[in-house]
Image (spheres, rainbow, N blue to C red):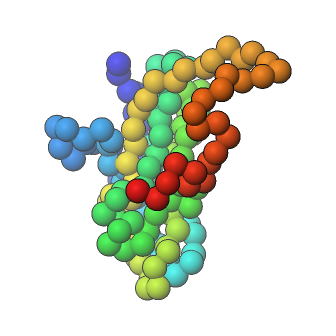
């Protein structure tokens, strides 16, 4: 599979995997001015790129960078971003500061990671009953603490 990427800004950085075993590619902030995220604040950070997935059998998921989240409390405001195969606009990343300190995002900072994955669109069948399982409808901790 080939992922076509277009720079929308000369300062944009093309996504790349940090290691040979990385599932995701780092996304980089592409800013004219630094963005200061105060505690509890959200901001939409441009990457300066657009992508073209080959067809509807692929999706791009945007995930938080674990180090940024754990060390600094900076994560995605929408948990996981979904870039559909027919979207051709700029990829932007919604960040939120969950820490108690200001955090400055600078152009070139790695702000998220993008994972390309297959999509399965199921045929929908409305039914009157579902099959029974041992767990049944138990949820939200019903399988135990450990």
Q: Residue furthest bottom?
A: 101
Q: Is residue 113 above or below residue 36?
A: above
**Residue 51, x across and y down, in percent:** 46, 34
Residue at 56% over, 55% down: 141
Q: Is residue 45 visible?
A: no
Farthest residue in the front direction? 134
Say left or right for 77 vs 73.
right
Q: Position of residue 79 (x, y in %)?
A: 53, 54
Location of residue 88 with respect to 109 vertically, above or below: above
Residue 137: x and y in percent read 67, 40
Please report the residue visible at 43 percent of the width from the left and 85 percent of the height from the top: 101
Please name the residue shown 65% across and 26% down the image.
Answer: 132
Q: Quadrant of the N terminus?
A: top left
**Which residue sits at x=50%, y=59%?**
76
The answer to whether residue 62 is visible is yes
Q: How many marks?
A: 0
Instruction: Residue lying at the far right in this picture: please name it.
Output: 128
> Is 101 above or below relative to 60?
below
For this rendering, which residue is in front, 125 or 107?
125
């Amino acid at each position: 599979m080939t992922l076509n990427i277009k720079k929308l800004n000369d300062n944009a950085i093309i996504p790349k995997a940090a290691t040979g075993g990385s599932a995701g590619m780092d996304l980089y902030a592409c800013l004219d001015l630094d963005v200061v995220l105060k505690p509890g604040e959200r901001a939409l950070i441009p990457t300066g790129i657009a992508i073209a997935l080959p067809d509807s059998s692929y999706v791009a998921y945007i995930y938080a960078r674990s180090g940024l989240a754990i060390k600094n409390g900076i994560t995605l405001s929408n948990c996981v971003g979904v870039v559909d195969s027919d979207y051709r606009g700029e990829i932007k990343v919604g960040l939120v500061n969950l820490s108690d300190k200001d955090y400055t995002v600078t152009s070139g900072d790695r702000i998220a990671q993008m994972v390309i994955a297959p999509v399965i669109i199921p045929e929908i069948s409305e039914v009157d009953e579902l099959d029974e399982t041992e767990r049944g409808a138990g949820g939200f901790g019903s399988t135990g603490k450990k």
